[in-house]
Image: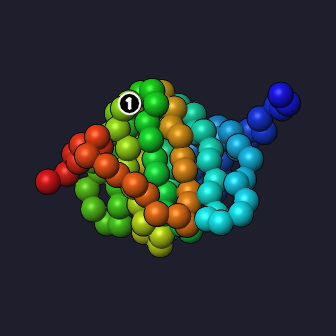
Amino acid sequence: MRRFEVPRRPIEHYSSTGVLMEFLPRVSGGDQTRVHVAHLEPGGTLGEHPTTNRQVFAVVTGEGEVRADDGPRIPIAAGQLAIWEAGEVHQSWATTAMTVVLVETTGELELPEVFTPLDG
């Protein structure tokens, strides 16, 4: 076993506020995948920007809102996730303190029937 301290820093790109991001190691070989943990303060936002790769936004604790392109702000809470495709412009807000796991990947996502769609 090896242990490491996880690097973390505030995120201010794209007019983001109230966000502390923890950066986990990159995964190499095959599909490119990165995993981060974001801690958003109440009222914090990950500002509007396009995704580089497919992105999974999985809420672990708290509540917030997410938006894709120019669509409406949609509530999201612990136990739910949003998926944005590469190039999709998106933004997220925390209405309470919120912890989110972010997965960015060039790989395909497997969404078996245990994942219940929340939209239509």
Q: Residue furthest left?
A: 120
Front residue of this view, candidates 108 and 75 = 108
Which residue occupies 58% across, 39% down? 38
Side of 39 where 114 appears, left or right? left
Q: What residue is at 74 percent from the left and 47 percent from the top?
A: 25
Quarter in which the C terminus is drawn: bottom left
Which one is nearer the viewer's eye here, 86 or 16? 86
Please indicate whether residue 37 sits to the left or right of residue 60 in the image: right
Question: In the rendered image, which quarter contains the N terminus?
Answer: top right
Q: Is residue 66 left or right of residue 7?
A: left
Q: Position of residue 119 (x, y in %)?
A: 19, 51
Could you tell me which secondary element the residue under label 1 belongs to? loop
The residue pinned by badge 1 equals 78
Residue placed at 57% from the left, 34% from the top? 39
Residue 75 visible? The answer is no
Q: Say above or below: 51 vs 18.
A: below
Residue at 45% x, 27% y: name it: 61
**Closer to the camera in the image, 104 or 46:** 104
Left or right of 74 in this view: 58: right
Q: Position of residue 47 (x, y in %)?
A: 51, 54
110 up-or-down from 108: above or below: above
Single out the residue that lies furthest toward the bottom.
87
The image shows residue 66 at horizontal and vertical percentages of 36, 49
Type of amino acid under label 1: Ala
